[in-house]
Image: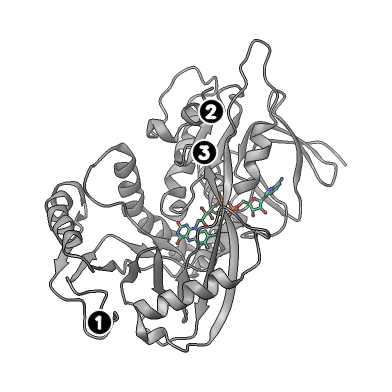
Amino acid sequence: MADVKTDLVVIGGGIMGLWAALHAARAGLEVLLVERATIGAGASGGLLGALMPHTPDRWNDKKQFQFDALVSLEGEIRRMEAETGLSAGYRRTGRLIPLAKPHLREIALRQVADADVNWRSGEGGFAWRVLDAAPDGLFSLDVAVHGAVYDGLAARVSPRGLLRLLASVLVKMPGVTIREGCASTTIDPLAGCVVLSDGTVVHAGHIVLAAGVESFPLIDSLPILAGGVARPASGTGVKGQAARLAVDLDPALPILYSDGVYVIAHDAGGVAIGSTSEVDYADPLSTDHRLDDLLVKAERLVPALAGAPILERWAGLRPRAIGRDPMAGPHPDHPRLHLLTGGFKISFGIAHRLAQAVVEGIIARPSYESDDIALPLSFRCESHLSP
Ligand SMILES: Cc1cc2nc3c(=O)[nH]c(=O)nc-3n(C[C@H](O)[C@H](O)[C@H](O)COP(=O)(O)OP(=O)(O)OC[C@H]3O[C@@H](n4cnc5c(N)ncnc54)[C@H](O)[C@@H]3O)c2cc1C
C-alpha cells in the first residue's frame, strides 16, 4: 500500500471524531477520518440522544462550557440540516423531573434563582420552574406527589440521525476522506504516523484519537519519553443498555427523567428508554435482564409505556476517562497527538465544542508552546494524565 500524507488523521467515526473532522475541514485542513467498522459502530450509534444540562446551582467553568455547548448546538444542527435536507431529529423539548420527596422540592425551588442568573444567553434565559403538579396522567400517582421541575434547556436528538447528518456534510467537503472498514493499527505520535489495517502508512501533521473506549488502551501503551514519567491509566468503559418502544407519545413531550431512567419520545416515532450503568459485565454489547429491569422501572414511572412492544434492544460502552470529565487536547508528551474522548454520558451535547477547541489548538498553536485552549482545566489531558 502507498503512503499517504494529510494534515490531520482522525481515528474513530463516532460523535467526537465526526465533529473533529468537520471543524478541521471548515478550517481548511485536509482530513482523513478512519473508522474501523462503520460510522456510529461504537457508543454513538445508540437510541437515546438526551442533551441534559447540569443543574443550575453551584456554577463553575464546566457547567458554563456545557451550557454554552447546549445553547449553540441547535444552530450548528440547523445549519447542516438546511445544507443537506436531512433531519437530526433535534428538538428542545425541555425535561420534566417528578419530585417525590419534600426536600427535593425545596432544593428545586432554591435552584430557580440560580437558573435566573446562570441559564442566560444571548437568546434569552432558559426556565427552571417548579410545578405544583406534573401534567395529568404522565407519571404514576406516587412519583410526582410534590410536583415536578420543568427544565427548558434540555433537548434531544436522534443519535443516528445526527451522525448521518455529519457524515453527509463531511463527504461533500473538499479535502475530506472518510474510510470505513479501516482501523488504525499502530500510532507513532512522535513521527506523526498512523498505520492502517490495510497496510497504508499515513503521515499526518496531527492525529486526533477519538476511538471511544478503545482510545484508552492506545493512550496507555504510548511510549514514555526519555526522562519522562509513567502516566496513570486513562479511562475505562461503562456499559449501558437502552431500548426503543412502540408507544404513541407526542414527540414534543419533554424528556421524562427520574432516578436514572430517561423516557424520550422521538420525532421519527418510538420512545427511547435508557439506560443502565454497568461497570461489571461479561459481554459489553449484549442486552440482558438489566435492561428488562430498567423497562419495568420505566413502566412504573410512566404508565403509558405498559405492555408496549419493543422495537429494539441495544447496548454499548461509554468511554469514561478516569478523571470522569471528558479528555480533550494535546497529549502532554506528544503534542501532535490530540485526545478527544471520555465524554461518558454527556457527549452529544458538548462534542461539537470539545472538537472545536481541539481543532483550534491544532490551527493556532502548531508548536504547542502556549496554553490557551478554551477548555475547563479538568477537561484537559494534562489534568487527566498527570502522574
Ligand atoms: C446506553 C447508552 C446511552 C447513552 N445515552 C446518552 C445520551 O442520552 N446522551 C449523551 O450525550 N450520551 C449518551 N451516551 C454516551 C455517548 O453515547 C458516548 O459518550 C459517545 O457516543 C462517545 O462517543 P465517541 O465518539 O467518543 O465514541 P464512539 O461512539 O464509541 O466512537 C468511537 C469509534 O471509533 C472506532 N474505533 C475504535 N478503535 C478504532 C481504531 N483502532 N481505528 C479506527 N476506528 C476505531 C469505533 O468503531 C467507534 O465507531 C450513552 C451511551 C450508552 C451506552
Quadrant field for ligand 1: bottom right
| Picture disc at residue 385 | 2
* Three-letter amino acid code at the position of disc 3: Ile
| Picture disc at residue 322 | 3
Residue that carries the numbered disc 1 in the rendered image: 141
Q: Residue at x 37, y 34 (%)?
A: 376
Name the one closer to the observer, 338 or 243.
243
Residue 266 can be seen, yes or no: no
The answer to whether 237 appears left or right of 105 in the picture is right
Q: Residue at x 70, y 24 (%)?
A: 223
Instruction: Report the Cα–Cα distance between label 2 and label 3.
Output: 9 Å
For marks 3 and 1, give the one nearer the viewer: 1
Q: Residue at x 21, y 84 (%)?
A: 136
For marks 2 and 3, give the one nearer the viewer: 3
Label 1 environment density (alpha carbons within 10 Å; few <14, some 14–19, many ≥20): some
For marks 2 and 1, give the one nearer the viewer: 1
Q: Quadrant of the C terminus?
A: top right
Q: Position of residue 157 (x, y in %)?
A: 43, 66
| Picture disc at residue 232 | none
Instruction: Report the Cα–Cα distance between label 3 and label 1.
Output: 39 Å
Name the one closer to the observer, 363 or 142.
142
Label 2 environment density (alpha carbons within 10 Å; few <14, some 14–19, many ≥20): many
Label 3 environment density (alpha carbons within 10 Å; few <14, some 14–19, many ≥20): some
* Three-letter amino acid code at the position of disc 2: Leu
The answer to whether 55 appears left or right of 325 in the picture is left
Secondary structure under tag 3 reads loop
